[in-house]
Image: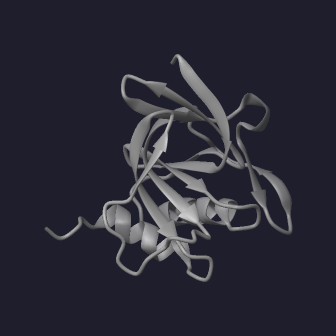
Amino acid sequence: MATAETIHASAVVTGERAIIIRGPSGSGKSRLARALLQAQQTGLLPYAKLVADDRVKIAAAHDRLVVSAPEAIYGMIEVRGLGIRAVECERLAVAGLVVDLAADDAARMPENMTARLLDILLPRLPIGAAVEPLPIVLAALNTAPKG
């Protein structure tokens, strides 16, 4: 993994790929990460496990983007009103989707949006500030685009 950096984001692996959750401070990155973990516990997702919360190490490897937690925060997630909590984590995962919270370019029907991280293109899902992200993310994971 030659090219690497740390970004302000959270990451949750759902199935075979991880979702990178970006957004400004207070936009709900940790909240969406916890909601995805709870979706697995209630059967809405077959698998979900935290990779990292608040800071995510990203690395380009073989035309894929690999995500992991910085060692200092591995196994921790913020719960607003409770503080930092321990949670079971994956050491690393391959990213498959970028979700941008509080995105200015969120649209009712977005088309083929992508994010470039370390020269790797990934599908991107922008979600507006006033929109509950979990139903949209679950729909993106469980449905295919028409056409």
Place residue 76 in its image quadrant: top right
Place residue 69 in its image quadrant: top right
Residue at image coords 57%, 71% = 104
Residue at image coords 54%, 36% = 67
Front residue of 48 and 8: 8
Relative side of 74 to 63, left or right: right
Tell me residue 81's x, y (percent): 86, 69
Q: By what rule are the colours in the image chosen? A: one colour
Front residue of 60 and 107: 107
Tell me residue 27's x, y (percent): 69, 68
As displayed, is residue 97 above or below residue 16?
below
Relative side of 77 to 121, left or right: right
- The quarter of the rendered structure image containing the C terminus is bottom left
**Residue 43 is at least partly visible in this image:** no
**Residue 34 is at least partly visible in this image:** yes
Residue at image coords 56%, 79% = 132
Front residue of 7 and 82: 7
